[in-house]
Amino acid sequence: MSEIAIQIQDLTKVYKTNRVKAVDSLDLEINKGEIFGLLGPNGAGKTTLIRVIVGLLKSSSGHILFDGEELNINSAKWKHHIGYVPQETAFWKNLTVYENLNLIGTTYNIPNKELKERINHLLEGLYLVDHKKKLASKLSGGMQRRLNLAMGMVHDPQILLLDEVFVGLDPQTRNYLYDYLRDFASKENKTIIITSHLMEIVDALSDRVGILDLGKMLAVDTPENLKNTHGKGDILELEINKEFNEDLVAKVQKSEKDLVVEKKDQIILVKTLNAISKIPEILNSIENEGFTVLDVKITKQSLETVFISLTGKELRGD
Amino acid sequence: MESKGDNQNKFISLTKKLGYEFRTTYKIGLKYIKEIFRSKLFLIIAVAMPAILMIFMGVAFGGASSSVESFSILVINEDIGFTNVSTSYEFGESLIGTLENVTYPVGEGEDPINIFYVYETPEYNQSVEDYLIYEEHGLHLTLIISENFSEVIFNFENDVIITVVGDPATGVYHSAVSTFTTIYNEFVDVTRLSLGDTTGESVIVENYIGIVGNTTVFDLMVPGLVIIGIVLNIVFVSSTFAEEYELKTLEKLQLTPTRAIHLIGGMSLAQLLVALVQIVVLFALSLAFGYNAIGSFVLAGFIAWIMSLSMLAIGMMIAAFAKKGTIASSIASVVAIPLYMITFFPVWGIENIPMFQVSGNTFGVFDILPTNLANNMITDVLIYGQTFSDLIFEFVSLIIITAIYLAIGLVLISVFKLRPKKG
């Protein structure tokens, strides 16, 4: 059984200024070594939730437990466990890369020798070692984002919260970061909570995904399960060898449960959840009627369609 | 009962904790120092601007050309005296006597020199008017003592009873007015304290510690110019803190176990180093422009150094309410203006308003501003040659005032910038 890294119980955050309930009686458990993707449209409460967890915002009520223990969110102990990488890059532009990391590390009371090793390890891992003497302001955008990430990780936190860290990265850096985070979680048994509007990254990176809207968690599951249980499903395009009529469409419709079948010229369109498992029965039903399937195309259900299906709205701009 | 081992553990734990506090504060201080000294804005605001101001004032008012050994003054004494019961008072004459007797020391074994060379005339007439042609007669100042002078002094009234006439275009005029104002205020205080005892004038002479004979306007301005240089630090302290908030680097520190005390401790280290650089540069420049000082530069610099911490505190107070660096620096500039002005009040002869007295030492309203207190102290040290032991009350006042400012700054920055937001 997985060990729980962080447990959120009945957490509520109401902003006093506008009485908005940004987080509403939220319960959530995230396991050790797990990468947890947090999705939600703008205003869903993702950033509020993260800022409450890291202690930048005070919750209105509820509890946050680390390893089953409720810690003061402003205590040094809690801060040692938590690492946060915000969306905006933030660093001291007149300090070098090394100086930025050294400063943050010092505040965590890491012994000098150990700190030096950690910094060098991070610099090597994030391909910043050749730039460690550069002023942070002189780095490229991608390097600044990597420095931002390193600053959240220098104290070797058990739980790392990443808020839209993939935004503005070129594909190479994005892929590199993707691999780095995967390794970080799996090899070091660290917990990562990540928010992003880049659904394909969250889909590929996350062990589980939570979809949040209006402060409430609408669904929490593995990306595969979410796609199989929510949304409009996969789309199968079956090209048939000769003219066919509505009878064939009706036969296909009856071959499996929960199929939506349409005729489009020489093609049969099938919409269904978890389409791959249903392909044999569908093909049988067509061939039994004397037709041959020339080509099969499958468009998989995406996390984005699940997201839209659950939140009932299109993605709102970032 | 606690064992020896427990005590040792407690000691080790305390040592580690203190080690952490110092290391964190030092590293944050180092961060600010690096940021500040790598910033062009700092070099312009904190070093170049005060240095340029010092050079400008040095060129305008410095040098030995406008200096004099004694101020030549004409006193027109119209005071008719005042009789109470059977005792007559002629305070106009007493004042003249005081002015004639005030001296400043020159050196061991040498006779002290009179600060004023006094010409006296009983009434104002055409011949006197002719006498007022300063260039011709070498007069620096004319004082007209009004006819009700004794009555006003006796009755503790606040009417204007001395008229000062002179040429403000000359540098010596300002020095003479400033010196006269100081002596005159002391004369009135002492006379009123000892009413009925006409030996008040000798008390003034004894209490007065002397002034450099060749004091120029520039000399009187130097303490204020050093203070102004340090006051400018409010701008970059407040903008640095506000930028930390604006650029979210403060948030980075909030995520760590860093506390407000580390931030303020670190900034204090940086501020003290900056102030040290400013003090050395500005005093060196003042000497290059012929600054005449008889007191200790080290003591004067130390006063400015302590005062610089209050500027840090004011900077933090501003930063506590500003969300952007540009807003903070604008507010800081506005705050700095009255501080500059009040700093120069003594040069303009504007008197402090007493609040309370401790062991004969008066604490005035303007002394609430550390700039004013420090300016007077530096003037006392450099111009009047006072030593640490002469200024203990002022030192205690400056340290208390600075500590109060720092405490307010610490609380405000903690509450408004470092605590988790309630939203």
Image (cartoon, coloured by chain):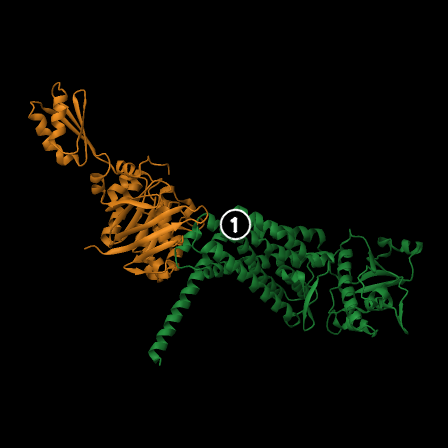
Chain colours: A orange, B green
Q: Position of residue A56 (x, y in %)?
A: 40, 53
Left or right for B25, reference B330? left
Is residue B154 or residue A246 the one in the foreground? A246
Which residue appears farthest toward the top when viewing the image?
Answer: A243
Amino acid type of the residue that numbered disc 1 sits on in the rendered structure: Ala
Residue at point 37% right, 74% down? B10
Q: Is residue B148 visible?
A: yes
Residue at point 47% right, 51% down? B244
Write down the residue under mark 1: B322
Residue at point 64% right, 72% down? B389
Left or right for A14, reference B230? left
Circle 1 chain: B
Is residue B352 or residue B71 the one in the foreground? B352
Q: Is residue B285 visible?
A: no
Asked which quadrant contains residue B157, the reply is: bottom right
Q: Position of residue B20 (x, y in %)?
A: 40, 65
